[in-house]
């Protein structure tokens, strides 16, 4: 007999006593998992290892009441056992395997900060209406990073315990300070030998100022290029304003030059979704495909700070972005069904968490959060920020995430100081209200910078959080797509394994 049948069940949200959960005559014990409704008919069970089980509505209650019969519900019972949702012994026989899988999921923490962003200059020849950091100026002294600060940034970077570092040059338009990039790369090469570090170099650029000399240097030093393409010309040019209105043509020319000199896989492009972009999901997806990209990252605009000061152009609610995202994703899937490989990058990051046991060190979707643990920003003026969004906030005179200054603070003060520690509790979704009981937790992340910027509180409030709304709906949508068509599940597997 199942003991819980005799226990009077109160209609209350209080936890029931231990006796309610104790297994005596039932054949199994519950392991920790969370669950939620996926659709009218389906619900999903997820545990901390990222294992999931999609089942008919009511299954979670049945599992919790220990009513799953190993004989008549053999498949469900086996799935629950193999997915570590239940155990036939109080201590699961594969506890060590579970521990290893959990450690693996969190192993992005093993080596601490990898991405070091050097804001090499704020100068730019574009005036994109969503950009908060560029300055149309010839004044190098005011807006370029000094050599002294470059040296100090490199010295701090070399103190990271991580043996594999990424050094990313950002602007403004980074190529306007190409001499500084060359200086920084040459200094880093020497230091990397001394400190036994492997360095990946990335330049974020709109490619407008690119020259043959720059391309040759990039080739010699294996520097990756990340550029911006917002879609077809009639979306890109209004978004990425430039005197002469030739931003689109210059971007395409630059991408072509990079591919010829460096190889196809050495240049990637990023999309920023403005209000205008929302009307063109299919055209944007088609544009990336026609320009020879095998992936696209459907990125919403950061809904805070300067980016949304121009409300008409850049402010939109998350629901509209989700509509845009789903329409675009459908188109991308159709390309795959037609026999092409074409990946959406945000979905791929989430799908890696869902479909593989491996860690995913994507800064915006991890717990503990990516700020400091994975990324640090050395600003052009020597100030050190916890993330790229943190320095964007600083441009709005909000220095909440300022960690220190290259002239005044050492490694420990910046990375382990009081300021850094003060963000810790808000960086862990396992303990954040709302997230702590959310089934999608292992596939999501914590983002105190976003919470602070949009809700004035680093912990955030999930019911009205745009971050939560976006991630919850995208994760739910990906599961439903996989459930609806096995061909889509196969396509998703090809994205995570590429
Ligand atoms: S942010 Fe939302 S979707 Fe993500 S774990 Fe928290 S409650 Fe779940």
Image (cartoon, grey):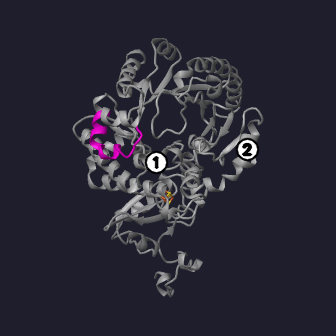
- Picture coordinates of residue 248, whole percent (x, y): 36, 28
- Labelled disc at residue 225: none
What residue sits right under mark 2 in the picture?
416
> Where are the magenta residues, as a range?
271-288
In the picture as drawn, the residue positioned furthest to the left comes out as: 338
Residue located at (70% from left, 20% from top): 194
Mark 2, Cα crowd under 10 Å, few <14 / some 14-19 / many 20+, is few
Compared across the picture, whether 276 is left or right of 131 comes to: left
Residue 66 spot, x, y in % from top left: 45, 74
**Of 63 and 160, the residue lying toward us:** 160
Mark closer to the chain start, 2 or 1:
1
Q: Secondary structure at mark 1?
A: helix
Q: Is mark 1 within 8 Å of ligand 1?
A: no
Q: Is residue 127 above or below residue 97?
A: above
Instruction: Name the magenta segment's main secondary structure.
Output: helix
> Residue drawn at (38%, 32%), measured in percent from left and top?
229
Mark 2: which secondary structure? helix
Taking the image as drawn, is residue 33 in sight? no
Quarter holding the C terminus is top left
Residue 184, given in percent of the width and then of the height, sits at 63, 21
Read off the residue under disc 1: 353
Camera-nearest residue between 190 and 90: 190
> What residue is shown at x 58% (from left), y 27% (from top)?
121
The answer to whether residue 330 is left or right of residue 135 is left
Is 82 situated left or right of 374 in this image? left
């Amino acid at each position: 007999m199942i003991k819980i049948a005799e226990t009077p069940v109160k209609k209350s949200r209080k936890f029931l006593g231990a006796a309610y959960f104790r297994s005596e005559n039932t054949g199994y014990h519950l392991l920790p998992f969370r669950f939620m409704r996926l659709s009218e008919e389906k619900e999903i069970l997820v545990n901390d290892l990222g294992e999931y089980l999609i089942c008919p509505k009511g299954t979670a209650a049945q599992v919790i009441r220990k009513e799953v019969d190993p004989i008549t519900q053999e498949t469900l019972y086996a799935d629950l056992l193999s997915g570590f949702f239940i155990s036939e012994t109080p201590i699961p026989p594969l506890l060590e395997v579970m521990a290893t899988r959990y450690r693996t999921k969190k192993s992005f923490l093993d080596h601490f900060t990898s991405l070091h962003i050097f804001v090499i200059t704020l100068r730019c020849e574009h005036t994109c209406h969503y950009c908060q950091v560029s300055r149309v100026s010839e004044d190098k002294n005011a807006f370029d990073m000094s050599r002294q600060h470059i040296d100090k940034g490199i010295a701090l970077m070399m103190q990271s315990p991580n043996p594999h570092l990424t050094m990313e040059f950002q602007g403004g338009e980074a190529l306007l300070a190409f001499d500084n990039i060359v200086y920084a790369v040459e200094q880093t090469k020497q230091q990397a030998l001394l400190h036994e570090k492997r360095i990946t170099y990335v330049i974020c650029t709109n490619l407008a100022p690119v020259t043959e000399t720059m391309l040759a240097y990039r080739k010699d030093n294996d520097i990756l290029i990340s550029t911006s393409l917002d879609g077809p010309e009639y979306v890109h040019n209004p978004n990425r304003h430039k005197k002469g209105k030739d931003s689109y043509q210059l971007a395409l020319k630059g991408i072509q030059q990079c591919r010829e000199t460096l190889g196809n896989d050495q240049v990637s492009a990023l999309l920023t979704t403005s209000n205008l972009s929302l009307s063109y999901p299919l055209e944007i997806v088609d544009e990336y495909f026609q320009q020879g990209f095998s992936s696209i990252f459907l990125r919403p605009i950061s809904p805070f700070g300067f980016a949304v000061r121009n409300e008409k152009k850049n402010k939109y609610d998350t629901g509209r972005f989700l509509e845009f995202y789903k329409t675009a994703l459908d188109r991308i899937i159709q390309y795959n069904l037609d026999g092409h490989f074409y990946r959406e990058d945000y979905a791929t990051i989430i799908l890696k968490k869902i479909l593989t046991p491996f860690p995913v060190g994507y800064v915006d979707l991890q717990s503990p959060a990516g700020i400091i643990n994975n990324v640090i920003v050395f600003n052009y003026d020597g100030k050190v920020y916890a993330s790229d969004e943190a320095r964007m906030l600083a441009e709005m005179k909000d220095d909440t995430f300022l960690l220190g200054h290259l002239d005044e603070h050492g490694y420990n003060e910046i990375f382990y100081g009081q300021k850094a520690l003060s963000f810790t509790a808000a960086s862990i979704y396992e303990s954040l209200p709302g997230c702590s009981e959310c089934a999608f937790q292992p596939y999501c992340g914590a983002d105190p910078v976003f919470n602070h910027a949009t809700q004035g509180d680093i912990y955030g409030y999930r019911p009205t959080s745009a971050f939560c709304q976006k991630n919850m709906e995208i994760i739910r949508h990906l599961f439903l797509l996989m459930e609806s068509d096995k061909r889509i599940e196969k396509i998703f597997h090809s994205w995570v394994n590429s």
